[in-house]
Amino acid sequence: MMVAEGNLDYALARVHARHGQLLDEAAWLRLEANRDLGQYLDSARASPLAEWVASLDPTRDVHAIERTLRTEWRQYVESVATWHPRECQPWLAWCAWLPFLSLLARLSRPEPAPAWLLADPVCGPVAPGNPAERAAALQGTPLAPLEPAILGRVPMSSAWLAHWLTLAARSDVQTQQLVSRLLQTINTHAERLLSNAADTPTLRRRLADQLTRLFRASDGTAVATLCHLGLLALDLERLRGGLVRRSVFAARVQQAA
């Protein structure tokens, strides 16, 4: 629950400090030179990524790794939201659910949820049954606005965005324009991914460059916080990929032994 309230200057000072801790490309390459999962984790713990992998060890399977990163992201976003004025908090905190959208989208299908999804602390409690039963289970939870997507009426991302827009505090024209630029940047990236998925690393670097420029242009507004979260999400996606690939490789080696 968000009970604290900051002011925008205070919030942005903290956001800028956290932004300065993001890894540069050279640091990523040093981390990714570790082929073994244990060595990769040790290297990550010696970097600004330490808080994200603190509870992980080489025995965790892929699903446990992904659950941990989703939980850490949710806690981080909700904490960042509390730095801001109260009217901004729900708008920012709604971003905590973004990594869960692809999982929740599976619940619009009629087939039973797999065991790994049932084990998720957010999705698991609403996963049993059919889509109608799952939609009913969302009632009274923070995810209730996503009910239309569970019922298959709209895409999950559209349901998330529609509610996010209702949470936005009143703002000046400049901030509204910055939000529009941010949404357009992300939409364009998503369209490029669909048409050229083979070049995903290049597209992600391009998105990171665009978000960095927008982060600077948004200085003094809460849109800078959204840009920071977007850049962090790209880093966590890269971290997730590194962890998952090494975990899968380790599991295959063990099976072959």
Image (cartoon, helix red, strand yellow):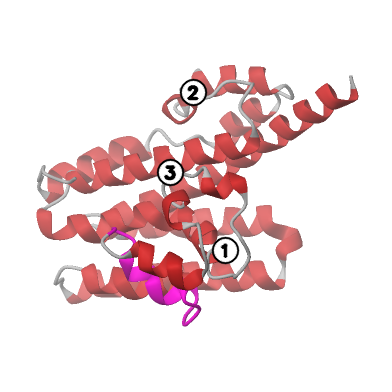
Q: Which residue is mark 3?
A: 121
Under circle 1, the secondary element is helix
Quarter of the figure that contains the C terminus: top right
Number of on-image labels? 3
Q: Secondary structure at mark 3?
A: loop
Dividing the picture into quarters, in which one does residue 110 lie? bottom right
Assess whether residue 52 is covered by the magenta stretch.
no
Q: Is residue 2 above or below residue 36?
A: below
Q: Residues within 10 Å of mark 3 (few under 14, many from 20)?
A: few
Quadrant the N terminus occupies: top left
Does 196 appear above or below 61? below
Left or right: 248 as drawn, with respect to 256 = left
Which comes before the other along the chain, label 3 or label 2?
2
Of residues 187 and 175, which is closer to you in this image?
187
In three-dimensional space, the C-alpha distance between marks 3 and 2, rounded to whole angstroms, equals 28 Å
Horizontal and vertical percent position of residue 251: 77, 28
Can you tell which mark lies on residue 47?
A: 2
- Secondary structure, mark 2, is loop
Q: Which residues are magenta?
A: 141-155
Sooner in the amino-acid sequence: mark 1 or mark 3: 1
- Mark 1 residue type: Arg
User: What amino acid is found at the position of numbered circle 2 in the picture?
Assistant: Ser
x 74%, y 25%: residue: 35
